[in-house]
């Protein structure tokens, strides 16, 4: 949802959503500048140019979903169902774009299917259609398969650091925006 909120429009949302949007933006900035992430994007840059960052982001989502048990005490299936239920119970807090996308996300179980390369190809294809520039992002799954160990190793290196960064940033946001 944070990707659909522009500029200072986040200020019109409740405090907890504001913090989430700001945290999301900070994570995006951290990620884009991280040397390990940039190393992953370089592998794709020749074919996908500035979309290589978007693609690697999805690849890293794949590795998180595939290895979910390494990062969480619960199962991916339980997490995704709880998350979808939470969104469905709080649709009034979602942006219009997110409300429109939610039924498709739930029906096709996007988050659970990130663990499969077919799920990643479908998501990248949907993104490609929304961009309408024929980037053929779904074809990048070939590079994912070709360099699978390299991408997974880079993800594992990166993920620990982004977790630490996120924890620190959330603490800072809680100081800036204490609950009312």
Image (cartoon, grey):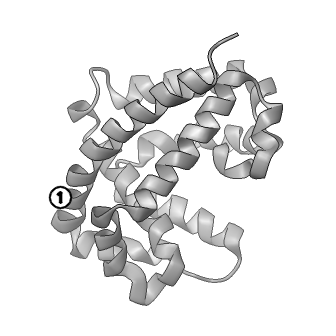
For label 1, the SS is helix
Asked if residue 11 shows in the view, the reply is yes
**In x, y percent, where is residue 12?**
83, 33
Pick the residue in front: 171 or 139: 171
Q: Give the image quarter of residue 168.
A: top left
Structural crowding at the residue carrying mark 1, measured as other residues with C-alpha within 10 Å and reported as few (<14), some (14–19) or many (≥20)? few
Asked if residue 118 shows in the view, the reply is no
Pick the residue in front: 169 or 6: 169
Q: Residue at x 55, y 29 (%)?
A: 173
Q: Residue at x 44, y 63 (%)?
A: 32
**In x, y percent, where is residue 26?**
52, 47
| Residue 153 in the image: above or below residue 42 | above
Indicate the quadrant containing the C terminus: top left, top right, bottom left or bottom right: top right
Q: Give the image quarter of residue 112.
A: top left
Q: Residue at x 55, y 22 (%)?
A: 174
Indicate the quadrant containing the N terminus: top left, top right, bottom left or bottom right: top right
The residue carrying mark 1 is 153
Q: Is residue 108 left or right of residue 78?
A: right
**In x, y percent, where is residue 98?**
73, 42
Q: Is residue 125 left or right of residue 11?
A: left
Q: Residue at x 59, y 33 (%)?
A: 20
| Residue 18 in the image: above or below residue 56 | above
Pick the residue in front: 105 or 59: 59
**In x, y percent, where is residue 131?**
68, 72
């Amino acid at each position: 949802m944070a990707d659909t909120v522009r500029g200072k429009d986040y200020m019109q949302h409740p405090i907890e959503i504001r913090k989430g949007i700001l945290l999301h933006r900070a994570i995006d900035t951290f990620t884009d500048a991280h040397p390990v992430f940039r190393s992953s994007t370089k592998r794709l840059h020749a074919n996908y140019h500035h979309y290589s960052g978007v693609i690697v982001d999805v690849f890293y989502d794949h590795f998180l979903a595939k290895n979910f048990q390494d990062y969480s005490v619960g199962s991916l299936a339980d997490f995704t169902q709880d998350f979808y239920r939470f969104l469905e119970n709080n649709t009034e807090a979602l942006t219009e774009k997110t409300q429109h996308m939610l039924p498709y996300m739930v029906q096709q179980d996007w988050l659970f299917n990130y663990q499969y390369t077919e799920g990643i190809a479908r998501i990248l294809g949907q993104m490609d259609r929304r961009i309408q520039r024929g980037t053929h992002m779904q074809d990048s799954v070939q590079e994912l398969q070709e360099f699978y160990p390299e991408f997974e190793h880079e993800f594992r290196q990166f993920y620990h650091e982004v977790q630490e960064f996120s924890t620190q940033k959330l603490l800072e946001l809680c100081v800036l925006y204490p609950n009312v």
